[in-house]
Amino acid sequence: RVDIDWVPEEPIALIANLSAVHREPGHEGYEYYETNLLGAEKVCAWAEKVGCERIVFSSSIAPYGPSESIRDETSLPVPETAYGGSKLAAEKIHQIWQAKNPLRQLVIVRPGVVFGAGEGGNVSRLIRAVRQRYFLYMGNQKTRKAGIYVKELCRAMVWVLNSEKSKADGVTLFNMSMNPGPSIEEYVDSIARILDMKVWIPRVPSSLLFVAAYMIELVAKPLGIQHPFSPVRIKKLIRSNNIVPSYLVENGYEYQYTLDEAFAAWKQDNPEEWR
């Protein structure tokens, strides 16, 4: 809600707006909009104030909504959550900023789950579950989850930002995921290889896990106990985010990391997260 008052002594050539309230579950619906919309407005207003003509905005694949069908940058966004809706609206705020001056350059990236050192999110929880042998398949082995290693994401953002096509177009929107997005089984198998361990993953019906998750939530939520078995997280695990990075493919981007290479680099950078 507070304007950005800082005025730098030197010109600002680029603003990277990576900030967001994003963890689901974890926040009230209005908090996603309050932070993500007002944040976009404040950043764009500050860009106007300091005369910056280039912005990179990190959105999300959440505006697409979950789907077993393939979605790319031409697909109609149908957000199902407050987070997805707020990120789609924030994209429009940045696009309005760019439209005020055709010489401005806006790059919007919609990444899948971003993983790497210090992530502490879904992929970190998956590594812990595989390592401690409490991960369960619930008929979701082939469920695809768009995801990208954080160093690949940064590399792609710079690549798009500096491309002549992006500079000429004014607004560039691109998805960021491995191609194709790995399945749950591929994530698990890769983690096991990097951990150098053989794993046997039990298979249970998702309905049983939902019953157990709701029972745990019934007890844990009133007591303020944090746990990894939220019904919302389980629901996300069995629904695909089948997002493809068509813009990058069509324009010749060359990936630096495979899934195994990304996990190996993460482990090398921060081995304690893999212990």
Image (tube, rainbow, N blue to C red):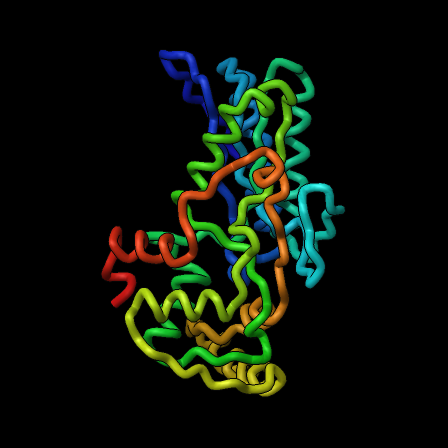
Quadrant location, the N terminus: top right
Residue in the foreground of this view, choosing between 191 and 20:
191
Kindly indicate the quadrant of the structure image that contains residue 191.
bottom left
Q: Name the residue rendered at 57%, 50% in the picture.
A: 31
Q: Name the residue rendered at 36%, 12% in the picture.
A: 9
How many callouts does the rendering have?
0
Where does the image place residue 100, in percent across and percent down from the top left? 68, 17
Q: Is residue 61 above or below residue 156?
A: below
Residue in the foreground of this view, choosing between 265 and 99:
265
Q: Is residue 16 above or below residue 237?
A: above
Image check: 151 left or right of 145?
left
Residue in the foreground of this view, choosing between 27 and 252:
252
Q: Name the residue rendered at 58%, 49% in the picture.
A: 32
Image check: 54 left or right of 89?
left
Where does the image place residue 222, in percent across and percent down from the top left? 50, 76
Q: Name the residue rendered at 71%, 59% in the picture.
A: 69
Q: Residue furthest right?
A: 76
Where does the image place residue 226, in percent across and percent down from the top left? 42, 71
Quadrant location, the C terminus: bottom left
Q: Is residue 34 at least partly visible in the picture?
A: no
Image check: 217 left or right of 225?
right
Q: Is residue 8 above or below residue 273?
A: above
Residue in the foreground of this view, choosing between 90 and 118:
118
Where does the image place residue 161, in percent across and percent down from the top left? 51, 27
Q: Is residue 51 at least partly visible in the picture?
A: yes
